[in-house]
Image: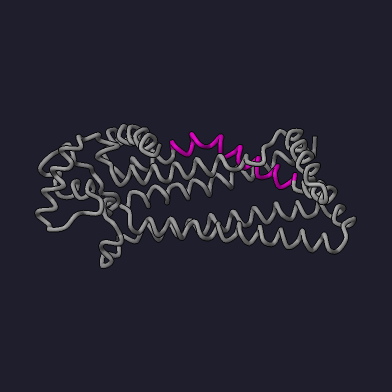
């Protein structure tokens, strides 16, 4: 499956590269186009998250009312989601798509001669063997090594990876002495922190709105129910917060052992994600105010 999407992305990235003749610029343009294609799904996901947060009040009412009758509780919850035209798993689609894109992009950036240039595997194996005999060791990313070592021999394996003085074929973990290889990963970390902070801020506002809307419901609950719900919410919030903080750490770890082209893709994706969330949040806010005024 990942090979399939890496191939599709590769055709698009190579088409852009042929136009601009620069790997870095091609990745930036590719990332913008991919983000635009994914924008309707992202907006739908934002709406789903907002609606899901608003529905939690009704969900809790059903859970409290039928806590001793699990069959009736399940049926009422299914009816609720049906009335609201939502699925309990509606938020999973976007996450699955993101995972597919991340892994497919790793395939593409680590094997650009296969997925972009579609060079014959036998020729790549021959070049790889030549490089291995010359260096005495096997390269971690054989196609990146071929681009570095064999571009002067064969124009077909040449890619212009120079971007603003950086070589996007470099791998940070293989050369800790060159500080320039850490510029893009560091910028990626910074934008990840900004994105995480923004997400937590938006989630906090959503939680505050949700808490104010369920205030009347909490008044009719006994103290033990309130404590149980509070504990469950705290646990969910801690889990979400941990996942939000862990994802940048995981991707940074990958960025350090992958060619810089992948880190550039993630960096541009982060910048676009921040802009998208600000825009979508402002759009929803203005839309909500229009509904109230109307």
Locate residue 152: give its quadrant.
top left
Locate residue 156: give its quadrant.
top left
Q: Position of residue 182 (x, y in %)?
A: 34, 61
Asked if 99 appears above or below 180 in the picture, the reply is above
Looking at the image, residue 141 sits to the left or right of residue 134; the answer is right
Q: Is residue 271 magenta?
A: no
Q: Quadrant of the C terminus?
A: top right
Looking at the image, residue 268 sits to the left or right of residue 236; the answer is left
Q: Is residue 50 magenta?
A: yes
Q: Position of residue 126 (x, y in %)?
A: 13, 42
Given residues 99 and 14, the one toward you in this image is 99
Asked if 288 appears above or below 250 in the picture, the reply is above
Q: Position of residue 266 (x, y in %)?
A: 42, 50
Task: Say which residue appears at 51% left-offset and 42% top-offset.
Answer: 96
Secondary structure mostly seen in magenta is helix
Task: Say which residue appears at 35% left-offset and 37% top-offset.
Answer: 3
Given residues 42 and 225, the one toward you in this image is 225
Count of picture labels? 0
Per the rendered image, the range of residues in magenta is 33-55
Q: Position of residue 129 (x, y in %)?
A: 13, 48
């Amino acid at each position: 499956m990942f090979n399939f999407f890496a191939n599709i992305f590769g055709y698009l990235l190579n088409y852009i590269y042929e136009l601009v003749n620069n790997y870095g610029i091609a990745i930036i343009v590719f990332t913008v186009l991919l983000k635009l294609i994914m924008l309707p799904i992202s907006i739908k996901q934002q709406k789903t998250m907002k609606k899901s947060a608003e529905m939690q009040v009704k969900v809790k009412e059903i859970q409290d009312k039928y806590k001793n009758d699990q069959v009736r509780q399940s049926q009422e919850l299914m009816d609720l989601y049906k009335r609201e035209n939502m699925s309990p798993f509606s938020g999973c689609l976007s996450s699955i798509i993101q995972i597919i894109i991340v892994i497919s992009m790793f395939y593409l950036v680590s094997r650009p001669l296969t997925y972009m240039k579609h060079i014959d595997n036998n020729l790549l194996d021959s070049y790889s063997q030549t490089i291995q005999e010359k260096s005495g060791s096997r390269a971690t990313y054989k196609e990146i090594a071929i681009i570095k070592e064999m571009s002067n021999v064969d124009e077909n394996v040449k890619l212009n990876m120079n971007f603003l003085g950086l070589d996007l074929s470099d791998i940070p973990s293989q050369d800790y002495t060159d500080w320039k290889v850490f510029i893009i990963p560091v910028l990626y970390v910074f934008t990840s922190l900004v994105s995480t902070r923004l997400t937590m801020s938006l989630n906090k506002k959503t939680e505050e709105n949700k808490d104010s809307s369920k205030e009347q419901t909490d008044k009719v609950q006994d103290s033990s129910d309130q404590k149980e719900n509070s504990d469950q919410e705290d646990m969910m919030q801690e889990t979400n917060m941990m996942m939000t903080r862990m994802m940048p750490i995981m991707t940074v770890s990958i960025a350090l052992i992958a060619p810089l082209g992948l880190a550039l893709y993630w960096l541009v994706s982060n910048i676009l994600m921040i802009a998208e969330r600000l825009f979508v949040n402002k759009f929803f806010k203005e839309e909500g105010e229009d509904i109230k005024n109307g």
